[in-house]
Image (tube, rainbow, N blue to C red):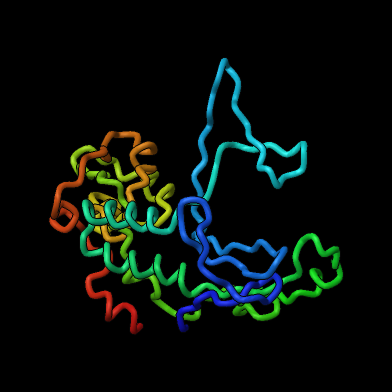
Amino acid sequence: MKKTRMRYCPWCGGGLEPRQVGERERLACGADGCGYVFWDNPTPIVAAIVEQDDHVVLIRNKGWPEKWLGLVSGFLERDAVLAALSETFAKKHPSAMGPNERTFVRGCEEVRLVAEPRPDTGDQAARRAAPRPGPEFGYLTAPIGGCITEVGNTVFKDLSASRQGFVPVFDPEECVHCGLCDLVCPDHCFVWRQEPGAGDEEIQVRLAGIDYNYCKGCMRCIDSCPSGALTKHEEPEGFADAHRVPMFSNPRKSRRR
């Protein structure tokens, strides 16, 4: 998809030109009476809960109806979000910084804008008739039975960049192999092995460890562990690779099956 650069107003079709809006230069419509401004803001917003004398301060935008109130909030500037994103990944996962920056920039620049009637035109029929994209899959187009048509599509999924500097650490000496950790894990990163049983037990299923490649550090397993075999520790550089128990012995071979 090619980068989209705003040139025309989506409200009236007039040309956009650089204008000083507040403290920044932004693209604004040059037509008289239109007032459209291309803010170039991404989706993230910031909001604050301001308390004063045991009350919460609410504000009203000058364009809102008289009885509308809201928290103190606003959109984040694109360059501020990118700077915070880069700083976060540079400290924890430098290798993931570049791909995440490019993903963010593409999300901002490759947006598709669809012109619709202005809210104050009163053309309700035209707004209802505006085409909107439907879901890729519906009850008529989804695979039969909800089957996953791309087998093994999560084998190479790497959630390590989602962690906030902490990982669960497994102590096999304290583990009772109850499986509660596996029940609450949203990403199934626990690795189990079958071992010969003792006495009348033919096979025992034992927890072998954690595949940190799939662990995002939510720590739900620690809260559920009844024996204290799982504890929260800081993640120093190289810890996950050194203590990881691979889920798949050969991911590429598993994917071809």
Q: In this view of the protein, can residue 206 be seen by the observer?
A: no
Whole-percent x and y of residue 192? 29, 57
Give residue 202's quadrant in the image: bottom left
Give residue 143's quadrant in the image: bottom right
**As drawn, is 44 to the left or to the right of 220?**
right
Give residue 116's quadrant in the image: bottom right
Q: In this view of the protein, can residue 107 be seen by the observer?
A: yes
**As drawn, is 202 to the left or to the right of 63?**
left
Whole-percent x and y of residue 119? 77, 61
**As drawn, is 150 to the left or to the right of 203?**
right
Q: Which residue is drawn at the image coordinates 52% and 63% (left, top)?
A: 19
Q: Nearer the viewer, residue 71 or 99?
A: 71
Whole-percent x and y of residue 147? 54, 76
Q: How many marks?
A: 0
Q: Which residue is drawn at the image coordinates 33% and 65% (left, top)?
A: 101
Q: Which residue is drawn at the image coordinates 34% and 71% (left, top)?
A: 155
Quadrant where the C terminus is found in the figure? bottom left
Q: Nearer the viewer, residue 153 or 184?
A: 153
Tell which residue pokes out farthest to the top in this image: 53
In this rendering, is residue 168 above or below 128?
Answer: above
Q: Nearer the viewer, residue 169 or 94?
A: 94
In this rendering, is residue 174 above or below 197?
Answer: above
Q: Which residue is drawn at the image coordinates 23% and 63% (left, top)?
A: 246
